[in-house]
Image: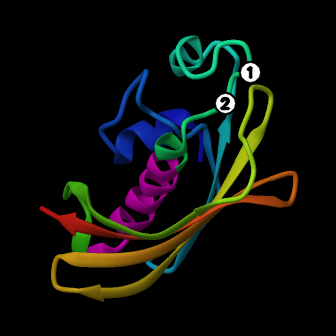
Amino acid sequence: MDIREIQKIIPHRHPFLLLDAIDELVKGKSITARKNVSYNESFFEGHFPSDPVMPGFLIIESLAQAGAVLILSMEEFKNKKVYLASIEKTRFYKKVIPGDVLVLNVKVISSRGKIVKCFGDAHIAGDKCAKVEFACAIE
């Protein structure tokens, strides 16, 4: 799935769309997505300009956006909106810098009513850089 197909599913747009491609989607179960981290990203201007590092909250947002695509693949949530409701058990392991390709894996842990709980982890060249459990509210 490319950027145009992603934009048909979630409402995020530049500069806040933090996905470039979906590599694998198992509807309602798991997703693998990619974010190509470029030096031209606006957040690098002010986040350690002499040693640019992608802010941790944007890594979590990238995982949440992948989670939103996954959740919206579930028949019961088609054409709904997905909002981040909670973030738990977050851990960062490695810096994300310009030139990195962030691989984002998200799995649905549970779904109850309009709340879907997910686990996500982010990797660069096979090295884990972050993990998080998060919940999304569906409207």
Q: Please, is residue 80 above or below residue 50 in the view?
A: below
Residue at position x 35%, y 35% in the image: 12
Q: Nearer the viewer, residue 114 or 86?
A: 86
The boundaries of the magenta stretch are: 60-75
Residue under circle 1?
51
Mark 2–mark 1 contact, CB under 8 Å? Answer: yes
Q: Position of residue 125 (x, y in %)?
A: 87, 51
Whether residue 50 sits left or right of residue 12 in the image: it is: right
Residue at position x 37%, y 27% in the image: 13
Q: Quadrant of residue 109?
A: bottom left
The amino acid type of the residue labelled 2 equals Val
Task: Please say whether residue 71 is one of the residues in the magenta stretch.
Answer: yes
Residue at position x 35%, y 73% in the image: 74
In this picture the colour scheme is: rainbow
Whether residue 79 sits left or right of residue 13 in the image: it is: left
Instruction: Label 2, secondary structure: give it.
Output: loop
Q: Quadrant of residue 91?
A: bottom right
- The answer to whether residue 105 is visible is no
Residue under circle 2?
53
Q: Please, is residue 63 above or below residue 26 in the view?
A: above
